[in-house]
Amino acid sequence: MKDIKIEVNDLSLYYGEKKALKDISMIIPSNKVTALIGPSGCGKSTFLRCINRMNDLIPNVTITGQMLVEGVDIYDKNVDVVNIRKKIGMVFQKSNPFPKSIYENVAYGPRINGIKDKKQLDEIVETSLRQAAIWDELKDRLDDSAMGLSGGQQQRLCIGRTLAVSPDIILMDEPASALDPISTSKIEELIHELKEQYTIIIVTHNMQQAARTSDYTAFFYLGELIEMDKTKSIFTKPSKKQTEDYITGRFG
Amino acid sequence: MDSNIPKKNAFTKESLKKQFRLSEFLAEKIISSVAFLSIAIIVLIFVFVFKESLPIFNFGEKEAPKTEIGVNSDSKPESYRAAPMEDLKPESYGTEPIEELKPETYGAEPITQEDLKPETYGDVQAESTVASSEQSPALGPENNEGADKTWSTFLTTEWVPVSEHPRFGLIALLIGTLKVTVIAMLIAGPLAILAALYTSCFASKRAKEIIKPIIEMLAAFPSVVIGFFALIVLASFFQNIFGYDSRLNAFVGGVAMALAAIPIIYTISEDALSAIPKTYTEASLALGASKWQTAFFVTLPAATPGIFAALLLGVGRVFGETMIALMATGNAALLSANPFESVRTFAATIGAEMAETVFGETHYSVLFFIGSLLFIFSFVLNAVAEFYVKGRLIKKFQGK
């Protein structure tokens, strides 16, 4: 783990009084895929949303501890949330394209960042959609509504939309959970290609998916980080009993 | 085991037979008939209003049988004030043959009264008709020409319904109505939509709980109260600021009508905005958009259809608003582009003059014609909006 992208120190999160994340400390390497696994309600999605401060939107959430992204504590008072989210993109569990045309969906991000030149926008849209491996399918219907696409296409469009603002880190919250096997495998291929340029953190329920796509795996249980290691080690010889029980399917 | 399986689960032809469910059948029929009844009532209202305005078109003999059917409705007024007139008319016309035609040539008859109108304004109708009896032989031929002219004066600008030569120019009224509507919508639209955007996207839950009911309470305000407020307070207030001549004018009326339209537009836009899934907001914020950018470029466009419907309802309210127009617009049928001139709207014209016209005469019919115009206008507006503008707006904001 030479290149540290994110360093988390004793991060705790409370929903009102309830402690949902308990003193998480971990290091996420750059340009790798890190998978967060664990049973439902164990806090892995909550943790993911901490990384780009999406939890700010939920009332009554308090967060303690440090979240250092490239050495900068993103929960520092002087840090602007909007700028964090520009650097840390997010793909959601349920594909959520805007009710706009396909082109507008992708161009939205660059546009709010002040890019007005049509030519430049066209270029960004094309490269983003190419990166998301969906350009060939959509290039002839860029003016159609994104709502008319299939679930898998919508999700890849959402990934393309995230790429269009050129973030450093991409957070994926179970990106393939609502998709069919073919779309899922397309997205997994995509993740594999994207890790050359981006640091990817992916939450998944599907352990095979974690094993297939990730370089590192972190196992969460009841709001605690039980274990984090290289994916190979976690799936072959986990050091904690709970991890082994979960991976072998004894619970969860 | 076998005994545990309920018999009704068995797929026999008997158990799968089509069942007749009486209560569901009845409920369905009742609901659908109620729905059709409401449509029928709307159509009937329009037919009635339009029928009352038919005489001005002077269709001649062909219309005679139709108007005879209308005699049934004439029987009602007879019991009030039309009765003495009917009795006296034979005197005024003497032995003229027209008299016999009277019941049938319903269209031509009112004109006589119309011309008599300045005099018949008082409560004692008998006197006036007697007084007019001296002139009536001379006016006889002119009356028929007058009936032809009614229709042709519609496109003039003068609205002088009560005169020896009445002119029913609708242009000034139309422009007046449009002027007030445009002013009201220019004020109410942005205010209401921005207020809705604030409450749905920015306000805290507590603030929303306070603001929404208060604005909605404004919708329950009787328009006469708003009109009174405009008449007493707003008119003086704006006159002090702008220093125009006529105290009551299109602008004051427009502002007052905006007050009436705001709660309607606000409520429906707010509902439309709140119905936008949170996932859109999250997606936008996750892309690094600020709250403002999200509200204006994602939430607002996504709610376009709802907001459009809200604006249409607002236009409908302003267009048909009578009491506020009557109290705050000055009611002078002037034709000008100046928003600070008095205007007279369609609805206010009907409201102000209907009580003072004589049943069945041209003026009366013209007022009903204006009523049908109001109906047609709002119908066309809604149709155009629904089928043309809305589709284009959605295409623009939401892709094909």
Image (cartoon, rainbow, N blue to C red):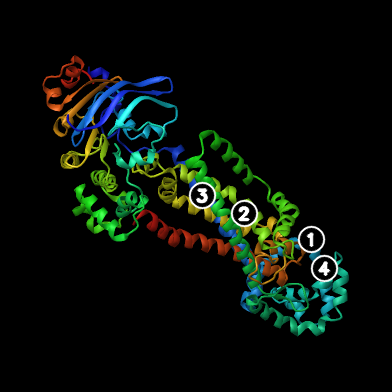
Lower sequence index among marks 3 and 1: 3
Type of amino acid under label 3: Ala
Cα–Cα gap, marks 1 and 2: 42 Å
Q: Is residue B38 left or right of residue A200?
A: right
Q: Amino acid at mark 1?
A: Ser
Residue A92 shows in this picture: yes
- Relative to residue B279, is residue A245 drawn left or right? left
Circle on res. B79 = 1
Query: Quick check: do tags 3 and 4 share a chain?
Result: yes
Amino acid on which the number 4 mark rests in the picture? Tyr
Q: Quadrant of the N terminus of chain B?
A: top left
Q: Is residue B354 visible?
A: no
Q: Which mark is residue B121?
A: 4
| Spatial separation of the CA atoms under disc 3 and disc 4 | 43 Å
Q: Indicate whether A45 appears above or below A143.
A: above
- Cα separation between marks 4 and 1: 19 Å
What is the secondary structure assignment of the residue under circle 2?
helix
According to the image, label 2 marks what residue?
Answer: B258
**Mark 3–mark 1 CB contact (< 8 Å):** no
- Given this view, does label 3 or label 4 mark the residue nearer the observer? 4
Label 2–label 3 contact, CB within 8 A: no
Give the mark nearer the N terminus: 1 vs 2: 1
Locate residue A80 relative to residue B313 in the image: left or right. left
Marks 4 and 2 in Cβ contact (< 8 Å): no
Which mark's residue is nearer the viewer, 4 or 1?
4
Q: According to the image, label 3 marks what residue?
A: B35
